[in-house]
Image: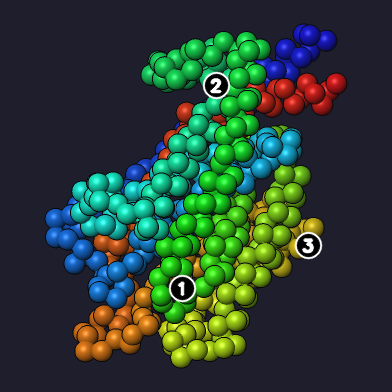
């Protein structure tokens, strides 16, 4: 019996060890690096010539950068959705998904922080937040909760990795000299004793309990950056719940996209099964319905009252210049995924993957629509301003930086999936033994 268990364990380890990039992996990494380099060049131009290289002006002072920031903050919620909630609820089927979720959360929160510095224009202004910050400002609240969330996310990725690092240290010839040294640096102290496992489990539970209110805080405070501003479209008490429900949806959508890609790329069909897609499909459709409810609430009530200050903003979204983008975001980000995922056939791996892509793409455009139209319809109408102040379309530098940041987040996910097992090895072995018993 012990011998058969040992053979089964070795098979799981061999299946789940990090794999070197093949040809397609190298091409994918090269494309991401190219996008990042173009983004860095565009940022160099912005640093050299100032924010004048962007299309942001007096009215649209938050453009595509803040749209990207809100998107990254939203998708980072996946760390608490999958890891914390499922761990605390003792949901064992989610084990193959937890590390994927943790890696996405870390990558997203890194670039959420960086894109804010980009938006400031001069990066040294970030220092002023700490020496001249005012506690009354929601911006300071955001800095505090993002920093807290970042460190908790890092720890929530690191602690469950320790037993797997002990396994990786046994395969020096496969990982290579440099990676072996790195594994030794971050995890050689782990011996796998019962005391260490007990302490690690306790620490993970504390982090899971802590990260849930912090995750809710980060999205609520981000919504308050908008809601505490007296502007049509943002002057809403619904914004906190609206942002959180949207973050849960795009986070879950990001997970199912990553699940499918890693499953195909690393041949993990035995570990990420059709049943996982079935269950995640149910979660996504539930979250899409919840977010659709908050969208109806967000737009129907102001549209019913149609106050003068809201009229131009709402008309611009429903029938005006932003209408194609608005209805695209609603349809692709919520309605079509709901229709796909309500049916059992739609919860197979490929349809769930397609619905996940729709959710993520729709979510990005939704964040763009939260930021830009409101800024173009201020409470006091624009008078005596140049015509280009009345419209906003990002410059190539803004597009390059935004796409570079998205590519950077995907590059972090790609590198972490090359360094660490994308599915927890030790947890998988433990669950296999428990199921066998």
User: Looking at the picture, does residue 418 appear above or below residue 403?
Assistant: above
Q: CA distance from mark 2 to mark 1?
A: 44 Å
Q: Quadrant of residue 79?
A: top right
What crowding class fits label 1: few (fewer than 14 Cα within 10 Å), some (14-19), or many (20 or more)?
A: many
Binning the other alpha carbons within 10 Å of mark 2 as few (below 14), some (14 to 19) or many (20 upward) gives many
The residue under the point 53% across, 46% down is 214
Q: Earlier in the sequence, mark 2 or mark 3?
A: 2
Cα–Cα span, label 2 and label 3: 40 Å
Residue at 45% x, 41% y: name it: 148
The residue wearing badge 2 is: 162
Residue 249, picture quadrant: bottom right
Where in the figure is residue 305, as x and y percent of width and height? 57, 88
State which mark lies toward you, 3 or 1: 1
103 left or right of 87 in image: left
Distance, label 3 to label 1, CA atoms, is 36 Å
**What SS does tag 3 mark?**
loop
* For residue 373, side relative to residue 425 (left or right): left
Residue 209, position in %: x, y? 61, 38
In primary-sequence order, the first of circles 3 and 1 is: 1
**Towards the viewer: 340 or 120:** 120
Residue 343: image tag: 3
- The answer to whether residue 72 is above or below residue 104 is below
Between discs 2 and 1, the one toward the N terminus = 2
Q: In terms of secondary structure, where does tag 1 sit? A: loop
On the question of residue 317 being in view, the answer is yes
Q: Where is 206 relative to 433, above or below?
A: below
Q: Residue 234: which disc?
A: 1
């Amino acid at each position: 019996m012990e011998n058969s268990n040992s053979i089964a364990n070795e098979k799981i380890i061999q299946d789940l060890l990090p794999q070197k990039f093949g040809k397609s992996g190298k091409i994918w990494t090269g494309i991401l690096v190219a996008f990042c380099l173009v983004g860095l060049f565009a940022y160099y131009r912005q640093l050299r010539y100032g924010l004048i290289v962007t299309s942001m002006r007096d009215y649209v002072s938050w453009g595509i950068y803040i749209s990207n920031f809100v998107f990254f903050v939203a998708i980072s919620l996946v760390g608490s959705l999958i890891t914390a909630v499922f761990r605390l609820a003792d949901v064992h089927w989610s084990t193959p998904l937890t590390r994927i979720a943790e890696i996405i959360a870390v990558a997203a929160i890194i670039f959420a922080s960086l894109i804010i510095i980009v938006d400031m224009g001069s990066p040294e202004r970030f220092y002023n937040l700490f020496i001249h910050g005012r506690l009354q400002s929601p911006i300071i609240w955001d800095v505090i909760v993002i920093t807290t969330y970042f460190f908790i996310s890092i720890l929530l990725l690191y602690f469950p990795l320790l037993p797997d690092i002990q396994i990786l240290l046994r395969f020096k010839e496969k990982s290579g000299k440099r990676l072996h040294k790195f594994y030794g640096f971050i995890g050689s102290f782990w011996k796998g004793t019962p005391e260490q496992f007990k302490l690690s489990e306790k620490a993970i539970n504390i982090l899971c309990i802590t990260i849930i209110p912090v995750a809710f805080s980060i999205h609520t405070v981000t919504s308050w950056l908008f809601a505490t501003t007296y502007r049509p479209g943002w002057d809403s008490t619904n914004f906190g719940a609206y942002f959180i429900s949207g973050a849960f949806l795009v986070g879950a959508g990001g997970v199912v996209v990553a699940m499918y890609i890693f499953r195909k790329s690393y041949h993990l069909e035995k570990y990420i099964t059709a049943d996982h897609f079935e269950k995640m499909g149910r979660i996504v459709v539930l979250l899409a319905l919840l977010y659709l409810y908050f969208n109806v609430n967000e737009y129907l009530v102001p549209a019913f009252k149609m106050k003068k200050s809201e009229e131009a903003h709402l008309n611009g979204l429903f029938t005006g210049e932003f209408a194609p983008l608005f209805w695209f975001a609603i349809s692709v980000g919520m309605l079509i995924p709901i229709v796909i995922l309500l049916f059992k056939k739609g919860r197979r791996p490929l349809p769930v993957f397609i619905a996940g892509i729709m959710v993520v793409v729709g979510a990005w455009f939704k964040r763009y629509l939260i930021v830009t139209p409101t800024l173009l319809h201020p409470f006091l109408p624009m008078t005596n301003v140049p015509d280009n102040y009345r419209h906003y379309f990002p410059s190539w530098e803004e597009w390059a930086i935004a796409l570079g940041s998205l590519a950077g987040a995907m590059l972090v996910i790609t590198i972490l999936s090359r360094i660490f097992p994308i599915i927890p090895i030790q947890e998988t072995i433990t669950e296999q033994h428990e199921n066998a018993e």
